[in-house]
Image (cartoon, rainbow, N blue to C red):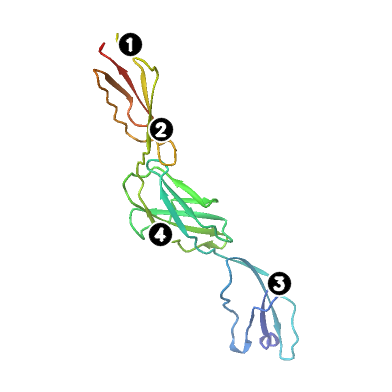
C-alpha cells in the first residue's frame, strides 16, 4: 500500500532480537547484504517503521544456513601398502566432510572420492605404490559445501621395518622326510602388519623352497615350504 511504501524496514535476527541493519526505504531497496556472519544457521525477520516511529509487528521468520569454513588438511603415507592417512581439523558447524583426490595438483574432480565422513581422519586404500596423489577436504552442512582445504600430496609405498621368520618345526631330520613351513611376518615402523609385500625366500646348505604365499596377506604373512636333500 502507499502507507507501506513510506515505512523504513528494520532487519532483525530473531535469535537474540538485536538490530542487524537499517534499510532506507526511500532508496527503494527491498534487500540487504549482511556480512561477517559465522557459519551455521541464522534466523531473520523484519519490522517496518514510519516517519513517526510507529513500528509494525515482526514479519514471518526465515532461516538461512551458511556453509562452514574450510578445514586444514595434513597426512602421512601408510599404514599399509597402497595406503595413505588423511587428518584434518574439525570445523564448527560442519556435519560431514568430503575428500577429493587427483593424480595432478589442483585437478580434483567436483565429485568427491569419499563423502559423508563424520570423523576427522581416514585411511585411503587401494592406491598405486610410488605414485603421488593430491588431496583436499571440504566441510559440509545444510548450507552447502566449504571452500577446499589446503592441498597436500602423499605417495603410498611399502614400508617394511621388520620381518619375523617362524618355522613349523625347529629341527629338520637329515633324512629329509620332514618339510617345515616357513612363515615370514612383515611389520612397518608402527609395528602394524603390512599386506601386499613380496617376500624373497632363499635357502642354503642344499635346502630347497617351494614358495606357497609369495606376497603377504592381510595378516602380513608370506609362506614357503622347506625341504632338504638329506644333508
Whole-percent x, y for residue 76 in the image: 41, 50
Q: In the structure shown, which secondary structural element does the residue marked by tag 1 occupy?
A: loop
Q: CA distance from mark 3 to mark 1?
A: 87 Å
Q: Looking at the image, tell me whether mark 3 or mark 1 is earlier in sequence order.
A: 3
Whole-percent x, y for residue 117 in the image: 52, 50
* Left-right relation of 197 to 150: left
Residue underneath mark 1: 173
Residue underneath mark 4: 151
Q: Nearer the viewer, mark 2 or mark 3?
A: 2
Q: CA distance from mark 4 to mark 1?
A: 60 Å
Classify 93 as above or below 52.
above
Q: Nearer the viewer, mark 4 or mark 1?
A: 1
Q: In the structure shown, which secondary structural element does the residue marked by tag 4 occupy?
A: loop
Q: Nearer the viewer, mark 1 or mark 2?
A: 1
Q: In the structure shown, which secondary structural element does the residue marked by tag 3 occupy?
A: loop
In this orientation, which residue lies closer to the viewer: 39 or 183?
A: 183
Q: Looking at the image, tell me whether mark 4 or mark 3 is earlier in sequence order.
A: 3
Q: Residues within 10 Å of mark 3 (few under 14, many from 20)?
A: few
Q: In the structure shown, which secondary structural element does the residue marked by tag 2 occupy?
A: loop
Q: Nearer the viewer, mark 4 or mark 3?
A: 4
Q: Looking at the image, tell me whether mark 2 or mark 3 is earlier in sequence order.
A: 3
Residue 48, picture quadrant: bottom right
Q: Looking at the image, tell me whether mark 4 or mark 2 is earlier in sequence order.
A: 4
In this orientation, which residue lies closer to the viewer: 28 or 42?
A: 42
CB atoms of marks 1 and 2 within 8 Å: no
Q: Nearer the viewer, mark 4 or mark 2?
A: 2
Whole-percent x, y for residue 83 in the image: 40, 44
Q: CA distance from mark 2 to mark 3?
A: 59 Å
Residue underneath mark 2: 220
Classify 69 as above or below 205.
below
Residue underneath mark 3: 16
Return the residue found at the far left: 206
Amino acid at each position: 500500500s502507499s502507507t507501506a511504501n513510506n515505512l523504513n524496514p528494520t532487519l532483525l535476527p530473531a535469535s537474540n532480537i538485536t538490530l542487524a541493519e537499517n534499510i532506507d526505504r526511500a532508496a527503494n531497496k527491498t534487500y540487504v547484504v549482511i556480512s561477517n556472519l559465522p557459519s551455521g544457521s541464522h534466523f531473520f525477520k523484519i519490522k517496518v517503521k514510519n516517519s513517526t516511529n510507529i513500528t509494525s509487528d515482526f514479519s514471518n521468520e526465515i532461516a538461512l544456513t551458511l556453509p562452514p569454513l574450510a578445514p586444514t588438511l595434513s597426512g602421512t603415507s601408510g599404514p599399509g601398502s597402497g595406503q595413505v592417512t588423511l587428518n584434518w581439523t574439525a570445523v564448527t558447524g560442519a556435519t560431514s566432510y568430503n575428500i577429493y583426490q587427483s593424480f595432478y595438483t589442483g585437478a580434483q574432480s567436483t565429485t568427491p572420492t569419499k563423502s559423508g565422513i563424520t570423523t576427522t581422519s581416514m585411511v585411503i586404500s587401494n592406491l598405486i605404490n610410488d605414485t603421488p596423489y593430491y588431496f583436499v577436504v571440504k566441510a559440509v552442512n545444510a548450507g552447502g559445501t566449504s571452500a577446499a582445504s589446503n592441498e597436500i600430496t602423499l605417495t603410498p609405498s611399502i614400508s617394511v621395518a621388520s620381518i619375523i621368520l617362524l618355522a613349523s618345526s625347529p629341527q629338520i631330520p637329515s633324512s629329509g622326510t620332514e618339510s617345515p613351513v616357513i612363515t615370514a611376518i612383515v611389520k612397518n615402523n608402527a609395528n602394524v602388519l603390512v599386506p601386499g609385500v613380496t617376500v624373497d625366500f632363499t635357502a642354503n646348505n642344499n635346502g630347497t623352497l617351494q614358495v606357497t604365499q609369495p606376497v603377504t596377506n592381510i595378516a602380513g604373512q608370506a609362506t614357503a615350504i622347506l625341504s632338504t636333500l638329506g644333508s
